[in-house]
Image (cartoon, helix red, strand yellow):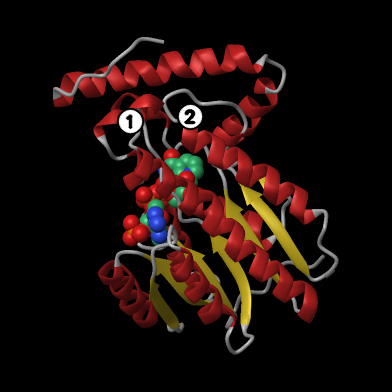
Amino acid sequence: MKRLQLKNQWVLVTGASSGLGEEMARQLAIQHKANLLIVARRRERLEQLKTELEQSAGVQVKAIAADLSVLADVDRVITESLEGGQLYGAVLNAGLTYFGRHADLPWDRFESILQTNVVGVTRITTALVKHFETTGKEGGLMIVASMAALYPVPYQAAYSATKAFLLSFTNALSHEIQNPKFSVTAYAPAGIATEMTGGEAFHGLKSWLMPVKQAAAEGLHAFVTRKYSHIPGRLNRLGSMFMHLLPKKFLAAQMGKIYYKSLLQSEAATGTPTPGRP
Ligand SMILES: NC(=O)c1ccc[n+]([C@@H]2O[C@H](COP(=O)([O-])OP(=O)(O)OC[C@H]3O[C@@H](n4cnc5c(N)ncnc54)[C@H](OP(=O)(O)O)[C@@H]3O)[C@@H](O)[C@H]2O)c1
């Protein structure tokens, strides 16, 4: 399959108001000269990015403020993306996490994580796959999962489970595609320095984090070259191969110790108690 040719094509990027999505949108516009549909809840941030990219890259940008945990908003994004029949690509990147004991996660926050990370992504993916399968048009879709999809992550239990869904779903789906000009890619980064990891709870893990520019560039390379799955960073890829050799229970216990230590450091810094011990 030939590489995606993004120049002058329309690409949907969700979660473009910060972090990885914002940086991928910037690189898609400046380096690949793609027109963009950018989606997130924070309208002002999207409008700022639209102005910046239209001026600096000379591309067209459409900002869509939407809460992807709400099905009506998800459907509006689908309609706006497919109207005119010009959509060429999509990077479904929007996601939420919770770092702490699962027992302390309020139910409405859990529902929001599940709706955004799983239900919204699955609904958009279903609509786009139907579109590309029925029209036979050329294009590509990339879903941002996480390395946390590869093994259970204590203290991010719900988050890692949503990402495990995305990785399994994306990989399975790619085998069902019959349009030879359409690809489905799973992207599974380890820690990245973004708003998501900017909180005090991640303080002890800062040295692990990949710069967002690198994570965005590797992700877009995987998207354009239509990779099946990609983990950015050579050490992360080596680590993932090694991890497959170890029992999941052992890996989860080691992750739990590291994450719990980081939570304790956050407790010391913020004065918020971290209940329980692993
Ligand atoms: N940072 C990491 O260490 C890491 C590692 C592996 C994978 N990832 C994945 O990478 C993706 C991007 O995360 P990030 O690190 O760049 O975090 P981030 O800076 O917090 O960005 C998350 C983006 O998702 C959007 N978003 C969240 N909930 C939304 C909702 N309900 N509706 C619409 N947009 C929503 C946010 O925009 P608004 O708040 O404006 O809505 C924001 O643009 C996520 O899927 C994350 O799971 C991150």
Q: Quadrant of the N terminus?
A: bottom right
Q: Is mark 1 within 8 Å of ligand 1?
A: yes
What is the x, y in percent for residue 78? 55, 74
Q: Is residue 278 left or right of residue 164?
A: left
Please tell me which residue lies in front, 169 or 63.
169
Does 265 sit above or below residue 233? above
Distance of label 2 from label 1 (alpha carbons): 15 Å
The answer to whether residue 238 of the structure is visible from this angle is: yes
How crowded pointer 2 is (Cα within 10 Å; few <14, some 14-19, many 20+) is rated as some
User: Residue drawn 61% across and 79% down?
Assistant: 87
Nearest to N terminus: mark 2 or mark 1 = 2
User: Residue drawn 39% across and 68% down?
Assistant: 66
Q: Quadrant of the C terminus?
A: top left
Does 77 sit above or below residue 264? below
User: Residue drawn 49% across and 19% down?
Assistant: 255
Residue 157: mark: 2
Please tell me which residue lies in front, 166 or 211.
166
Q: Which residue is mark 1?
A: 202
Please tell me which residue lies in front, 209 or 147.
147
Numbered circles on residues, count: 2
Does 20 sit above or below residue 165? below
Q: Is residue 17 left or right of residue 200?
A: right
Q: Which corner quadrant of the image does residue 156 belong to?
A: top left
